[in-house]
Image: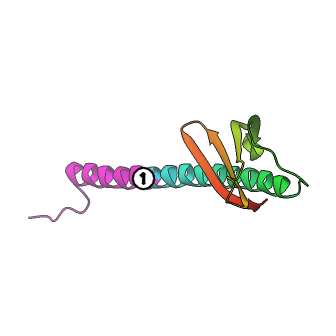
């Protein structure tokens, strides 16, 4: 009886399927990771825009009650977003203004609330 060396067709097909599944799993992992990084970067740009607006408001010599909306773009992606600012006048016994900044894009939103002295 002679001994044959090599692989059977079933072994080759099984190895090919296992390698293909490994490549598919790896590509799904990298796609999900890239998508999460993209969303995190957009959230960071939105956070910076909201904080920048709060700092602008802090620099004003006087505040007035208002609600404004302005169109902005987020970072190098130029994603359209809206920056909404709401300034609420303090009540008689309070000495602070309530300032809310919110950046909305797509179905996402970043919101900050701060208080400024009267």
Farthest-out residue, front: 92
Which span of residues is magenta-colored?
Answer: 1-26
**Residue shown at 25%/57% (left/top)?**
7
Q: Main secondary structure of the magenta part?
A: helix
Q: Position of residue 91 (x, y in %)?
A: 67, 52
Is residue 22 one of those drawn in magenta?
yes
**Residue shown at 76%/38% (left/top)?**
72
* Residue nearest the observer in this picture, 29 or 18: 29
**Residue shown at 37%/56% (left/top)?**
22
- Left of 42 or right of it: where is 10? left
Farthest-out residue, left: 1
Q: Position of residue 103 (x, y in %)?
A: 66, 44
Q: Position of residue 73 (x, y in %)?
A: 75, 39
* Residue nearest the observer in this picture, 20 or 79: 79
Which quarter of the figure is the C terminus placed in?
bottom right
Is residue 116 one of those drawn in magenta?
no
- Left of 33 or right of it: where is 110? right
- Left of 7 or right of it: where is 99? right
* Residue nearest the observer in this picture, 67 or 10: 67
Q: Position of residue 18 (x, y in %)?
A: 31, 54
* Residue nearest the observer in this picture, 70 or 78: 70
Q: How is the image coloured?
A: rainbow
Q: Which residue is mark 1?
A: 23
Q: Residues within 10 Å of mark 1 (few under 14, many from 20)?
A: few
User: Where is 73 relative to 46, above or below?
Assistant: above
Disc 1, SS: helix
Which quarter of the figure is the N terminus placed in?
bottom left
Count numbered badges in the picture.
1
């Amino acid at each position: 009886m002679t001994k044959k060396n090599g692989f059977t067709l079933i072994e080759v097909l099984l190895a090919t399927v296992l390698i293909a599944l490994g490549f598919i799993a790896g590509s799904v992992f990298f796609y999900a990771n890239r998508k999460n990084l993209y969303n995190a970067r957009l959230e960071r740009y939105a956070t910076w825009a909201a904080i920048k607006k709060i700092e602008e408001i802090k620099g004003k010599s006087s505040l007035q009650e208002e609600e404004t909306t302005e169109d902005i773009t987020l970072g190098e992606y130029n994603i359209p977003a809206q920056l909404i600012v709401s300034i609420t006048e303090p009540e008689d016994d309070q000495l602070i203004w309530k300032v809310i900044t919110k950046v909305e894009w797509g179905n996402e939103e970043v919101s900050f609330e701060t208080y400024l002295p009267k």
